[in-house]
Amino acid sequence: MGYVAVKGGAHAINNSVILYKNRRLENGADIEVESIKTNMRQLINQVMSEASFYDRDTAALAIKQAEGNMEEAVFLMRAHRSTLPRLYYSTVTDTREMFVERRVSASFKDIPGGQILGASPDFTHRLLDDALKESADGPKETIEYKEVPFNYELDKLPKVIDYLEGEGLFVREEENNDEPDDITKKAIEYPSTRSQRLQALTRGQTGAVTSLGYAEIRGYGISAHPNIGECRVGQQPVHIDPDDDYGEYFIGDFEVTEIDAFMPDLDEDDSDAGDKDLMIKIGYGLVFGQNETKAIAMSVLDYSLEHPVPGVATSDDEFVLYHIDSVESTGFISHLKLPHYVTFQSKLDRMRQSKGEQE
């Protein structure tokens, strides 16, 4: 095997780092972290979700340092997250306590509590707004809107699945509050558990989760059109129990998107004939921030992995969970541009030897 010596690498590397850091300032302008935090909410939501680290200030800093590169920002966030101490684990969280800011159902027009459109780009025209080219000299005036009377408490809204359960079309799974597996402390073992799958899906790269969810619906899996029973966006309260005889403590709220996707499925009844009734089952999605597309795709993949179709890639938990991870996939692809001199020289030696033997 031949070895190739490389000289002068340290100076070149130092200069490369300096060039990279200076490039952000080469036009004489710099963006404030607070501006990123205020004006790039959706980007911050994606970074926090994929990093599994809810901190808008740190996410804004990571985005600035990464020059808007999503994968690099997630890498920075996860690296920083690994240095932080784990003081407490939250108690069991019930999303029925969410303070709802947006709530829509694509399955029913009229739902208890009503449709709450909230803030969403769904109803906007996809046309560029030239007015945004102007520099911001200060806070702009907000557009006034007409408030609609509302008779429900936003942190006690009923769930749409309750309506189906009342009609006998949905059977609620037995509640399981066992301690979940934490894939940030122990690697996933296959076949995976439900808690491992949900954690990996909510940490998954937004584009990858969306693409595989789309492939699943198109026919590479269940080949069924899910119905969004309920999409919720709001502030979810979190509590901890430090075991100090004073009970639980409320430590704050965090923004989440929750999806209940309805999937029609055959369910065996209890009769001796073994007949099957068409029932509604649930695919579930929950992600940091307002990221509805990812949460919907997550719910599709959750159902696919819970009800696998033999021989289908999107029902294979190792295929799905391993390849949607942002840091894993990006890191491996990116490492290909780093020096592989020894291994490539070894390949060339074998090729030369083989060619010489043939001659």
Image (cartoon, rainbow, N blue to C red):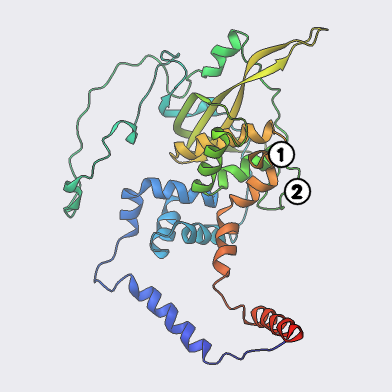
Q: How crowded is mark 2: few (under 14 residues within 10 Å), some or many (20 or more)?
A: few
Residue at image x 49%, y 58%? 71
C-alpha distance separating marks 1 and 2: 20 Å
Q: Where is residue 37 in the image (x, y as percent from the top left)?
A: 36, 51
Residue depicted at 73% across the width and 42% down the height: 192
Pick the quarter of the image with the N terminus: bottom right
Q: Residue 189 carries which label?
A: 2
What is the x, y in percent for residue 247?
63, 34
Residue furthest to the front: 359
Q: Is residue 244 visible?
A: no
Would you identify the image quadrant in which residue 121 lies? top left
Q: Do the residues labelled 1 and 2 touch (CB within 8 Å)?
A: no
Is 311 displayed left or right of 239 in the figure? right
Q: Residue at 57% across / 69% down in the picture?
A: 335
Circle 2: residue type: Glu
Residue on which disc 1 sits: 311
Judge depth for marks 1 and 2 and give the one in front: 1
As shown in the figure, which amino acid type bears the numbered disc 1? Gly
Q: In which quarter of the image is the C terminus?
A: bottom right
Q: Can residue 302 be seen in this view?
A: yes
310 to 30, vertically: above or below: above
